[in-house]
Image: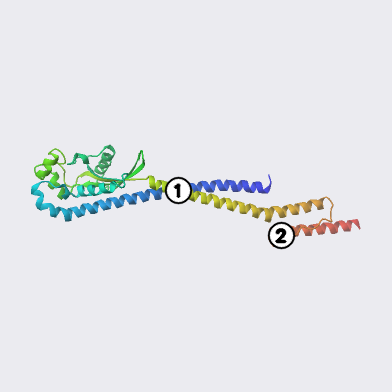
Amino acid sequence: MNLKTKFNLVMAIAFIVGVGLAGTLSYRLVQDNARREVLEQAGLMVGEAGAISEYTDHEIAPLLGPDLHRGFLPQSIPFWAAKTNFRTVQKQFPDYSFDQLALNPTNPADRPVDWQADIINAFRRDPSRTELVTQRDTPTGPLLSLSRPIAVAKDCLQCHSTPAAAPAGMVDLYGPNNGFGWNLGEIVGAQIVSVPMRVALDRAHNTFVTVMIGIVVVLLVVILLLNVLLHFMIIRPVRGIAASANEVSMGNMEAPEYTVRGKDEIASLAASFNRMRRSLANAMAMINE
């Protein structure tokens, strides 16, 4: 096995290890960035829903208050306003979802399915938890869900303590069997925002492929340049010195000296060999005399 083969074998091992490490780190990095990007979108959606709820509670509900004697107006409910606004957004982005659910809701449409109920129960088991991130697979790709608990505030008890205390219009609309018996401070539900990860993961995949192609190309260019450097600065001079040494060993003292330009180790080796050759030639001449 010659020197170039040994060198390329070592470089190939280093190339495989380097690409493997770079690939592992790059893949983890782009996946983390994709997840962080989706979480930022979910957080923004939760913030927007909170802003709509607060606006409804402070600006809309007081205006509708005088009209409540005519019947229950869901437009005065902050959660209803947030969900209604999001339905408009969902027409353009159907894969996104925003739900404000309760285990015992006034409107049966706000009752959670199994995986949503698991999230609410997780908050009930640990009331100190303020946020929960979950991921689940769907036919259209993975969905990342950001959830925050819904705790009963004092204002909630005006409608959800007992049917007798609730607005008559609400009881007439939804009945006396749902959405009552809530207690102050109790975790009764959760805001759940679900954002598709497909777009972010596709973008992360494309970034990963681009980065890996760049790394592979750079490493291949480096190996090629090192091979050129190895050939012209080491292998070719060493072959020349070896050929000259072979001539001398065969008794051909007339063989020309091998000269290497420069002041590196190969040039020093060639100069040392030429001195040895001249010394050997002088010694042979003295013996012949």
Q: Find residue 267 and name its label.
A: 2
Residue at x 35%, y 49% (from the top left corner): 38
Residue at point 26%, 53% (across, down) = 48
Q: Nearer the viewer, residue 232 or 202?
A: 202
Nearer to me, 202 or 34: 202
Where in the figure is residue 258, as x and y percent of width and height? Answer: 77, 57
Query: Which percent across, then down, holds residue 184?
Result: 16, 47
Quadrant of the snapshot with the C terminus: bottom right
**Residue 174 occupies quadrant:** top left
Q: Residue furthest right?
A: 289
Would you identify the image quadrant in which residue 264 lies?
bottom right
In the image, what residue occupies the spot 58% across and 50% down? 220
According to the image, what is the colour scheme of the structure?
Answer: rainbow
User: What is the C-alpha distance between the residues marked 1 and 2?
Assistant: 49 Å
Give left or right: position of 46 versus 23: left
Residues at discs 1 and 2 in contact (Cβ within 8 Å): no
Element type at mark 2: helix
Quadrant assignment for the N terminus: top right
Q: Position of residue 83 (x, y in %)?
A: 23, 47
Tell me the kind of residue under disc 1.
Answer: Asn
Indicate which disc, 1 or 2, sits on the residue closer to the N terminus.
Answer: 1
Q: Determine which residue is flagged by label 1.
A: 206
